[in-house]
Image (cartoon, rainbow, N blue to C red):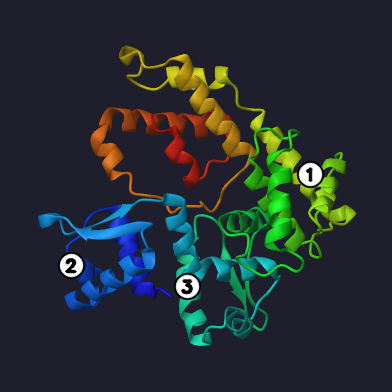
């Protein structure tokens, strides 16, 4: 397993090259320890990425298989498992978290404040004396948060009855559905898994929508959802698709035309409008509070295209002011033009 320091080294190098001295200073160890960590990291990364020396710039990280790289890191990072356990229960005592993670209670005690800081833009982690820790969010948001985690790793937490075989059937069925074209198959399957995990805790009342297609998808892969769970799932999906209806190409074109300085550059064309509109529709129909990959630094993007970067920021500001739609950090990278 990679330790916290080694994960931090990867995180730092993912942002920009750094010298051994800089890495040592930011992790609180000696330069020799950093070099040993880099050797171990390269062994663990197993060809999916590589840390190498690049002259005076120091060490840098080169990623060869991006998805595999992040999936590998995920297996060494207990934060998502800890968050998933908190989402699964109304209240969870620290000792119970430690037992479920098979880690010392002292580790959990130390990690909880860091977890709160790491996910502060996504959710509110709170505690109540005598009861334990909990995620202080609505039921709807808890479902989406858990779905985001399960999209990254469907086996992040053990779910009764969920095997690799029926997960493959679920993924295939979700990829082939056409009722919600804006929702990718892996997003829909992660929502189904989240509802399945929380099926005995759902209390919100949702409008009735046709649920036969969802029931058929779930039952074909050997799982079962009761009527309340199906109603919650279809209600949540339909709500997200209704939110997406506020976005149109005309809306996007109107906002682009209001960005200062953009008219003189003659960069607004059908392709730009369609790309931004499609991206926003997908963001609204399938919200991502917890991105599958960690957000990379925007510094290189800003340095390479400073004018486009500034115009993108103006566009995002106008978008938030005029349309009042939820935008998350994971959405923004698709809005830089």
Which label sits in the foreground, 1 or 2? 2
Mark carried by residue 235: 1
Q: Nearer the viewer, residue 52 or 113?
A: 52
Local SS, label 3: helix
In the image, residue 325 above or below residue 221:
above
Image side of residue 239 versus residue 207, left or right: left
Q: In which quarter of the image is residue 99?
A: bottom right
Gap between marks 3 and 1 measured at Cα: 34 Å
Q: In which quarter of the image is residue 234?
A: top right
The spot of residue 172 in percent (x, y) is: 70, 45
Gap between marks 2 and 3 measured at Cα: 28 Å
Which residue corresponds to the image point at 53% horizontal and 41% vertical from the top-left?
Answer: 327
Which residue corresponds to the image point at 77% horizontal and 49% vertical from the top-left?
Answer: 233
Local SS, label 1: helix
Residue sitting at the far left: 56
Image side of residue 16 versus residue 136, left or right: left
Label 2 sits on residue: 20
Q: Earlier in the sequence, mark 3 or mark 1?
A: 3
Q: Is residue 215 shown to the viewer in this render?
A: yes
Mark carried by residue 113: 3
The spot of residue 48 in percent (x, y) is: 38, 57
The C terminus lies in quadrant: top left
């Amino acid at each position: 397993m990679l330790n916290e320091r080694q994960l931090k080294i990867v995180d730092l190098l993912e942002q920009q090259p750094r010298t051994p001295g800089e890495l040592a200073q930011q992790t609180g160890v000696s330069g020799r320890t950093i070099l040993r960590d880099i050797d171990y990291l390269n062994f663990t990364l197993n060809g999916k990425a590589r840390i190498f020396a690049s002259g005076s710039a120091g060490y840098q990280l080169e990623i060869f298989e991006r998805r595999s790289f992040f999936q590998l890191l995920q297996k060494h990072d207990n934060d998502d498992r800890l968050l998933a356990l908190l989402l699964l229960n109304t209240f969870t005592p620290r000792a119970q978290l430690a037992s479920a993670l098979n880690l010392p209670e002292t580790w959990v005690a130390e990690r909880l404040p860091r977890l709160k800081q790491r996910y502060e833009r996504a959710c509110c982690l709170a505690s109540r004396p005598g009861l334990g820790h909990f995620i202080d969010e609505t039921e709807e948001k808890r479902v989406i948060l858990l779905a985001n985690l399960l999209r990254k790793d469907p086996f992040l937490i053990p779910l009764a009855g969920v095997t690799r075989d029926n997960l493959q059937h679920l993924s295939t069925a979700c990829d082939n559905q056409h009722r919600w074209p804006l929702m990718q198959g892996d997003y829909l399957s992660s929502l189904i898994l989240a509802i399945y995990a929380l099926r005995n805790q759902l209390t919100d009342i949702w409008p009735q929508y046709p649920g036969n297609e969802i029931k058929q998808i779930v039952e074909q892969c050997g799982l079962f959802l009761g009527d309340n769970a199906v109603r919650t799932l279809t209600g949540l999906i339909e709500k997200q698709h209704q939110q997406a209806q506020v976005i149109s190409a005309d809306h996007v074109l109107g906002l682009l035309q209001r960005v200062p300085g953009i008219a003189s550059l003659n960069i607004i064309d059908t392709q730009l409008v369609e790309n931004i509109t499609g991206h926003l529709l997908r963001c609204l129909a399938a919200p991502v509070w917890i991105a599958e990959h960690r957000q990379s630094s925007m510094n290189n993007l800003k340095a390479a295209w400073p004018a486009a970067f500034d115009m993108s920021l103006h566009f995002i500001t106008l978008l938030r002011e005029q349309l009042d739609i939820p935008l998350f950090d994971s959405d923004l990278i698709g809005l830089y033009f």
